[in-house]
Image (spheres, helix red, strand yellow):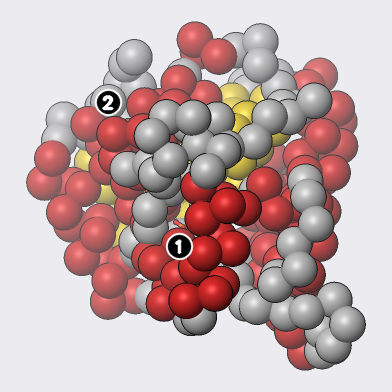
Amino acid sequence: MDLQGKRIIVTGCARGMGAATMRAYVRAGAKVVGMDVADETGTAAAAEANALGPGAASYAHVDISSRASVESAFDDAVKRLGGLDALAHPAAIQRSSNAGDVSVEDWDLMFAVNVRGTMLTNQVAYRYIKAAGGGSIVNFGSISGQRPEPGAAAYSASKGAVHAWTRSAAGTWGKDGIRVNAILPAMATPMYLEARARSTPGELTASHWRNHASIAMGGVYGDPDRDLGPVMVFLVSDASRFITGQLIPVDGGQTSVR
Ligand SMILES: NC(=O)c1ccc[n+]([C@@H]2O[C@H](COP(=O)([O-])OP(=O)(O)OC[C@H]3O[C@@H](n4cnc5c(N)ncnc54)[C@H](O)[C@@H]3O)[C@@H](O)[C@H]2O)c1
């Protein structure tokens, strides 16, 4: 699939799925501005993607939880790109929290970044994509937003909110030719590895039965470049022009969405 001429913003580009998505878009010929709070690694990731060609990538700082930051970063990026056709929005955080003792601080942090950040980036992107005549927004949900999550209650609630927002935004903006979908991934990224590093041996065993055993494709988390990149290209390309409002697992069969 060819993304020649497409102008795309990718959040969370410093590592993990954001970095892999940026690489996939540059390989497919798109012009990309990657954004993150982690400026040093974000700049390096954009330079690495840019070197792949035939498209191009550059970096900009954003804090997705702040309206002022999103508006100024997106305004600058759109000037740089000459317009906007798509937003890929993987940026998020994850913290452990038990439903019985989740703190207000943990709750507010997760909702500020994961939920407010999705609303703000989508809303600001919507204005520019509408002006360009339509396009695509790809959010990131989670299996955690679909099922009980005893070790990550606030994260689970925040991802459930991302799912609901994605459906409402798709239902509202379809008339403007803007599609909004959410990926539910299972990929071996730093976020996944950090969660495993925090786990006790007992938690790792529980995680095997909870998270890995149902992955039909070999019981292992995917590779972001090989397993996610092509799907991200498809979802911003014209080939997916009639797909909107969907929660799309890219997880080797870990979950099914009904
Ligand atoms: N890894 C998995 O298997 C998995 C499973 C389910 C859902 N997800 C979701 O997929 C998405 C990508 O996950 P990942 O594993 O690549 O994560 P990651 O932690 O590797 O990368 C997230 C990126 O977001 C950036 N970020 C964090 N807060 C930010 C802020 N306020 N403003 C701008 N950038 C910010 C981080 O600096 C980081 O570069 C996330 O939404 C995550 O919740 C991941």
Please identify the quadrant where the N terminus is shown. Answer: top left
Q: Nearer the viewer, residue 220 or 138?
A: 220
Residue placed at 55% from the left, 14% from the top? 240
Residue 73's spot in the image, x, y percent?
A: 51, 63
Determine if residue 81 is in view. Answer: no
Kindly tell me whether mark 1's CB lies below 8 Å from ligand 1. yes
Q: Residue furthest left?
A: 51
Q: Which mark is residue 137?
A: none
Write down the quadrant of residue 245 in the picture: top right
Residue 116, placed above or below residue 118: below
Residue 139: x percent and y percent? Answer: 62, 44
- In the rendered image, residue 146, in percent from the top left (x then y), is placed at 77, 46
Q: Image quarter for residue 249? A: top right
Q: Foreground residue, 33 or 235?
A: 235
Secondary element under disc 1, as helix, strand or loop, is helix
Q: Which residue is mark 2?
A: 28
Q: Is mark 2 within 8 Å of ligand 1?
A: no
- Could you say which is closer to the camera, residue 149 or residue 183? 149
Residue located beneath label 1 in the image: 192
Question: Which of the two labelled residues, at mark 2 and mark 1, occupies the earlier sequence position?
Answer: 2
- Say whether residue 185 is left or right of residue 14: right
Q: Where is the C terminus found, in terms of image quarters?
A: top right
Can I make out residue 155 in this image? yes
Q: Residues within 10 Å of mark 2 (few under 14, many from 20)?
A: many
Q: Type of residue at label 2? A: Ala
- Is 199 situated left or right of 150 in this image? left
